[in-house]
Amino acid sequence: MKPKSEWVLTDFNGILAPGLLYLSHADEVKTALGLVISLKEGMALTAYDLDANEEGKPDNIFASGVVERSPSNAPCNGSIWSLRIDSNGIRHESDIE
């Protein structure tokens, strides 16, 4: 898994299919540090979204996997890139700390 500074913010409501998370309508995304990276088929990536635990404390949700083109029938209109989530699935940061 890449360092948190290289994670990419995305909306985890964008599950296109089991194990497939929508990433972007563009060919580039920004990392948590604001660096722009170009998405490419097969690249390893970790996506995250802001979340909190039951007490309201930050506990971001994240998933790692491999970037792939979104299917042509993707429910997110204009979706270009998706993340094929690896076998670790979707987790919270507290799961790895």
Image (cartoon, rainbow, N blue to C red):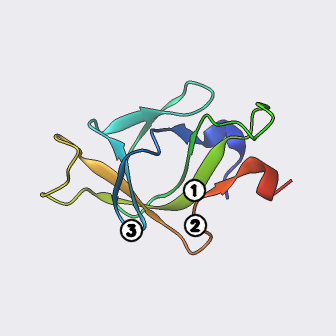
Q: Which residue is mark 2?
A: 89
Q: Quick one: SS at disc 1?
A: strand
Extreme residue toward the bottom, this view: 87
Q: Tell which circle, 2 or 1, labels the residue nearer the N-terminal end.
A: 1
Amino acid at circle 3 = Pro
Amino acid at circle 1 = Ala
Snapshot quadrant of residue 5:
top right
- Residue at horizontal 28%, vertical 35%? 26
Amino acid at circle 2 = Gly
Q: Quick one: SS at disc 3?
A: loop
Q: Which residue is mark 3?
A: 18
Is the residue 76 above or below the residue 67 in the image? above
- Residue at horizontal 65%, vertical 57%? 91
Q: Which residue is mark 1?
A: 63
Measured as percent of width and height from the top left, residue 29 is found at 42, 34
Q: Tell which circle, 1 or 3, labels the residue nearer the N-terminal end.
A: 3
How far is the residue under mark 1 from the one under mark 3?
A: 13 Å
Q: Residues within 10 Å of mark 1 (few under 14, many from 20)?
A: many
- Residue at horizontal 75%, vertical 49%? 93
